[in-house]
Amino acid sequence: MLPLFLCMTAFVQAQEPALSLRAPASVRAGEAFEISYSINVRGSKSFQAPAFKGLDLLFGPAQSQSSSFQFVNGKQSQSFTLSYTYQLRAPQPGSYHFGRASIIVDGKKYQSEPFDLEVTQAAPAGQAGSRRQDPGNPHARQRQQPSDPTPAKVSDKDLFVTASVNKKNPYAGEQVLLTYRIYTSIPVEQFSIYKTPSNKGFWTEELKIDADEQEQEVIDNRLYVYADVRKVAIFAQEAGPHTLEPMEIEALAQVQAPQRRSGSIFDIFDDAFFAPTQTVKKNLRSKPLKIHARPLPSEGRPASFDGLVGDYKLRFHYDDKQEIKANEAVTFTFTVEGKGNIEMIHAPQIQFPPDFEVYEPKISHEKQVSASGVNGSATFEYIVVPRNRGVYKINSFRYAFFNPQTEKYVERTFPEIMLNVAQGKDSPQTDASPAKTSSSASGDIEYIRTRTGKWTKAGKQFLFSPLFWLILAGECLVAVIFWAIYRKRIKRNADIAGRKNRKAAKEAKRCLRKAVFLLDEKHKDDFYIEISQALWGFLSNKLNIPQAGLSLENARGGLKERQVSDELTEQFIKTLEHCEFERFSPHPTGLTGMKAVYAEAENIIYRIIGALK
């Protein structure tokens, strides 16, 4: 009788995103405690915690994530948790109220519940250890005793897990499929992954697996049923040897319980058919894998290559049927589509004419993740505005990548584009085309000169004359001035913080100009994103804090250090919150709300500029 593998049907449970909170209801003054926020789906971003006013932040936020797979009674489920943990301390007793935390998943905003915290008086000295358990507790001793003196066991040949890759000697940056597979020859009630490898040195992407697909395989004359429990696409970031750490699984298997013979006639029921079964826990661990990533070949490497590896198709286009006019926007789109690490696709080096106002490209990624790997596309959308009429040329450019299948570099040259910009509605009557000039070399008759040259008196010399010395002194003075300006510029460039501070207003104005264009086009989401970037970017440059390290709390602290009033600081925070509210509101106020947010953002930026001078 062949053992049965209890995983005939399975499904992956889809979960609704939810931001949960774990916090104590009461603590003692002066004691450290933890508050943790958790989201149960992948793809989240822009986490914002409430301001923990009145508390001391000891550490955080510490970010951690975990995932697990379970197989119970023939059904497979998958769970994922991303947590943000803060370690805090309340210096004074009292009652505290904290608002909601928020996070964005797939463009939608989710919030946690608010909570109240009661802080009591500090514990008296000598009472901290009163909660320790008595080592002489008889119940504790009883729990340490084994319940079954002869437990059943699961051997490594009955149940095990393997790790395999489709390539052990890939190129650096090439996609490799890593598969974890469980084999069993005995019934399995459930299993769960409780430790996933970190895979240092690799960019990783979780792949979808077919939970219903199960196969049989004979290994060493023994029949096994196997199923894939996890599949990952990995990309080596650097060339050289790498080690993939093991993955650990905890499984509950059913095995026959060992029997003792009594010497009576009832020993005939010791046959395996009548033997009872026990559920035994088994810890499984895959073997580590060695992978050696080859460096990309130097032979034939084009100058435009920037490290992209994969098999891609390239496209650069615009609406050539559109009549291009001065002071009107034109959209150019560059698309890279194919199989590989979509997140590593870089922007092309496109040189637009100087008379074109070019905004930062909008970058969007579309990924398709399946058991066969990762593929998709990256799109770079350029919005440009020609300022004058005339004929313009966008120079040709090149874009390259390395194809690991053919082991060759692929470089594509995009030809130059000629654009005829017509007169716009509000543009001046100027023409950017080069002025025509006559030339006698072409055989044409030169124009008649109507002015004669300047005559000088015979015998009069300019060298060492008073005018000569005056001009020489003027040139020396100009040289000294230029040298002083040059030294001052070097000193200013060395002051990184000061340069960011001076750049803040300029960058904010640029983002606001782009927001005006998006406002006219009624692009709601892009408009609010641009306003938010203007506010955060302005604050990052003014406070000399990277945007990745900015939060509402340290924004308040930074403005306070620079003696900005509390009223202005709170108005800045309210403007950010107003922008986020309008962006994700289920009942947006439309064009009126967009204009109000723009006026509010412009006003608070200029007010803070005035306060920081």
Image (spheres, grey):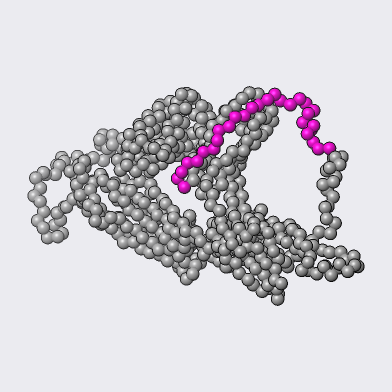
Residue lying at 48% horizontally and 38% vertically, measured from the top left: 496
Q: Position of residue 131 (x, y in %)?
A: 78, 34
The residue lying toward the viewer, choosing from 374 and 546, is 374
Nearer to the camera, 601 or 16: 16
Q: Residue furthest right?
A: 263
Q: Quadrant of the N terminus?
A: bottom right
Expressed as whole percent of the image width and height from the top left, the position of residue 409 reads 45, 66
User: Whole-percent x and y of residue 452?
Assistant: 11, 44
Q: Residue at x 57, y 68 (%)?
A: 166
Q: Nearer the viewer, residue 12 or 92?
A: 12
User: Residue 284 is drawn in which quadrant?
Assistant: bottom right
Residue 507, given in percent of the width and then of the height, sits at 39, 38
Q: Is residue 113 magenta?
A: yes
Q: Nearer the viewer, residue 491 or 334?
A: 334
> How many numbered badges does the structure rendering display?
0
Q: Which residues are magenta?
A: 106-134
Q: Is residue 126 left or right of residue 312?
A: right
| Residue at figure coordinates x 49%, y 34% from the top left | 543
